[in-house]
Image: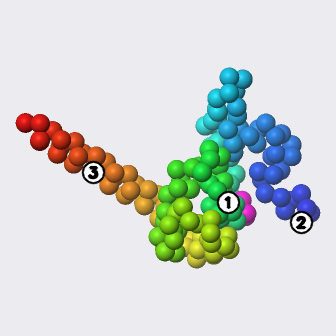
Amino acid sequence: MNGRDAMPACARVAAVDPDLADRMWNTVTTDDGQDLVDERMRGKGRMLCSTCPMRLDCISRALVSGWKDKAVYGGLDYPSRWTLARLIGRDLHVDAAGLHRIPQRRISDWLADHPDWDERMRRDGRDYWRSVKRRQRSRRELVQGSLF
């Protein structure tokens, strides 16, 4: 395997076409200063990430290094990283906002030790938003009940 084959797909794409790489994993700033997300290209970027051997390293690096941006890391966008950070934090007894204080290797090991992390993350995110909606509904009902 030569050095070029050892590079992750995102680095190979960026070496050939940096604008394409930005459309796949980052946001593109328009002339009027707004961030634009190309969802079609993002989908292609996520597919490349899903097969990348560096994926867990990329995700763990993003979670430790500050993951609160619009870019895609390891195939995960911000809402997915937030959900994963909450899941890992709960298992490691660390606040999700405090993941940057623990070694990246610990997060990498957690991901490797939990091969079902992707499904757990989806389930956890779905359950979280269901509970948010339930709380909102009960507040609405409480307010409407007190008006009459």
Type of residue at label 3?
Answer: Arg
**Pointer 1 local density, CA inside 10 Å: few below 14, some 14–19, many at least 20:** few
Q: Which residue is mark 3?
A: 134
Q: How many marks?
A: 3
Asked which quadrant contains residue 8, the reply is bottom right
Amino acid type, residue under disc 2 in the picture: Met
**Horizontal and vertical percent for residue 63?**
62, 61
Q: Residue at x 81, y 46 (%)?
A: 13
Q: Is residue 22 magenta?
A: no
Give the extent of the magenta segment: 52-56
141 displayed left or right of 12: left
**Quarter of the C terminus within the rendering:** top left
Percent across and percent down for residue 94 are 51, 71
| Quadrant the N terminus occupies | bottom right
Residue 48 visible in this rendered orientation of the protein: yes
Q: As shown in the figure, which amino acid type bears the numbered disc 1?
A: Ser
Q: Nearer the viewer, residue 2 or 57?
A: 57
On residue 65, the disc is 1
> Pointer 3 and pointer 2: residues touching (CB < 8 Å)?
no
Q: What secondary structure is marked by label 2?
A: loop
- 122 on left or right of 111: left
- Which residue does the numbered mark 2 point to in the structure image? 1
In reply to whether residue 54 is colored magenta, the answer given is yes
- What secondary structure is found at the residue carrying circle 1? helix
